[in-house]
Amino acid sequence: MEQKRGGFASSIGFIMAAVGSAVGLGNIWGFPFKMGANGGFTFLLVYLVLAVFCGFAIMVAELALGRSTGKGVIQAFGTLSGKYKWVGWLAMLSPFCLMSFYCTLGGYCAQYLVTNLSFLATSFDGSTGAELFALTLENQWSAVAATLIFLLVSFGIVKGGIAGGIEKFNKIGMPALFILLIVVIVRSLTLPGAMDGVSFMFSPGWSVANGYLEEAPSFFAVLATAGSQMFFSLSLAMGAMITYGSYLSKSENLGKNAVLIIIFDTIVALMAGLAVIPAAIATYGKSAELGGPSLLFVTLQDVFNSMGSTVGPLFGIVFYSLVIVAALSSSISLLEVLTTVIIDRQKTKGKPENRGKAALVMTIPLCITTFLVAFDGLGTIDTWQLIPSMGCWLNTFDFFAEGLLMPLGALSMSILFGWVVKPDFLVQENRAKGVAFKAAPFFVFSLKYLCPIIMLLVLLGQLNDFLGLGLY
Ligand code: TRP
């Protein structure tokens, strides 16, 4: 007997969950720095143009595929034809690799939250951000414990179900994140010298003219960076939107939802930029690390340390809490992609749906991969590496997730939808229950012509970055 599949309880709940998936570490430590280093406001425009001409179509296609098949990634592509299941595999392996290091980063945030709590409760011990981070990386077992706790919390939420776990978490988490961000932005923008940070982020050419960068990147580099950031930030090509779409009601307008998700994600990325970059530059000027783990775990901790022994830890607590919410809302979406695949399998085997067990089947191997990432302390501790030239397990998993699988998955998906199975069925799905889909011609054009070209560019850009090919 076919069981009824659960789903999102409300439209707003779905939007919050999808925005939660999109808003993650990429918005906080990727976007603001990349924007500043790649032409400021011009980068934002390039990013938005790519989001409109490519991101929108891929997102609508993913949501439509998920909803029309009502299946997770592997069976969703399998439903089109058994021949295309491998595209589903790409879209399943990349979230697995991403989740493998996302949990460690989430774990570090949790450790920083505890550190700031203890600074508030007792007193600041005088250590610098760099010292704290070195200690965090060296204390392998604490990092492993924090990582596993983060993974288990994600597991607990996913086990709670779509409406009862994921939707509930995001409906509280997303508004909370927004408020916490505003608190940090007010503090950041009122620090003396904060306006340099605003110029860094927004003024074209400012970062080069003021010595933050040696030379301006080429236009090709800007395009490739904006394209890969856009894909990553919108959680595309990793099965997330297919999976969430499969739990979505037929009366939802997919195009409208996609536009909202893109707008909210970009707003949060800009807000995150205003929260971190002005504070970092006001405190440290040119020597500030403005992106990646060093931004979060060195520069910003120093910013909080410089705010005094009560206010500092308080802002630290607010900030690391908001990063934890952002990271968790993404990690549950990653784990849900994997869990839905197992739930589908349970059903094809004629077994009753057991969500808890399905999530567990995926959480167990993740315990091993996240352990590897936490254990080598981002390369500070020598351990066995699958690809030694990558330097650490985080980079290895990131190379697979963002460098290879994500662009390859998106490229194959756009060729499949644009040319092989033809986008008509996706257009029909958008029109379910009489919903208007005026963007249909643009959607088809974008899938057929724009997406493959842009994805090829992103793939080249990623290989160039990860493998240091020096193409441009
Ligand atoms: N969008 C997330 C971020 O900005 C990362 C991400 C990429 C993701 N693909 C995903 C999250 C798939 C969940 C599901 O950090």
Image (cartoon, helix red, strand yellow):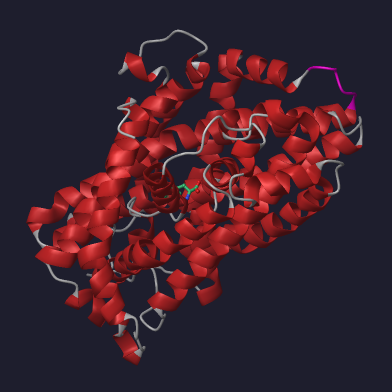
Residue 43 in the image, given as x and y percentages of width and height? 51, 52
Image: 163 above or below 471: below
Residue at the (51%, 76%) spot, across then down: 11
Residue 270 in the image, given as x and y percentages of width and height? 62, 55
Furthest toward the bottom, the residue is 434
Q: Is residue 125 left or right of residue 285?
A: right
Residue 90 in the image, given as x and y percentages of width and height? 24, 45
Q: 272 and 284: which one is in front?
A: 284
Range of magenta residues: 122-127
* Quadrant that contains the C terminus: top left
Residue at the (33%, 71%) spot, across then down: 4
Label total for image = 0
Q: Is residue 229 left or right of residue 139?
A: left
Image: 469 above or below 89: above
Any magenta on residue 79? no
Residue 41 in the image, given as x and y percentages of width and height? 58, 55
Q: Is residue 171 left or right of residue 372?
A: right
Give the main secondary structure of the magenta stretch.
loop
Any magenta on residue 124? yes
Image: 216 above or below 244: above
Residue 164 in sight here: no
Q: 6 and 289: which one is in front?
A: 289
Residue 206 in sight here: yes
Furthest toward the front, the residue is 209
Query: Which image quarter: residue 78?
Result: bottom left
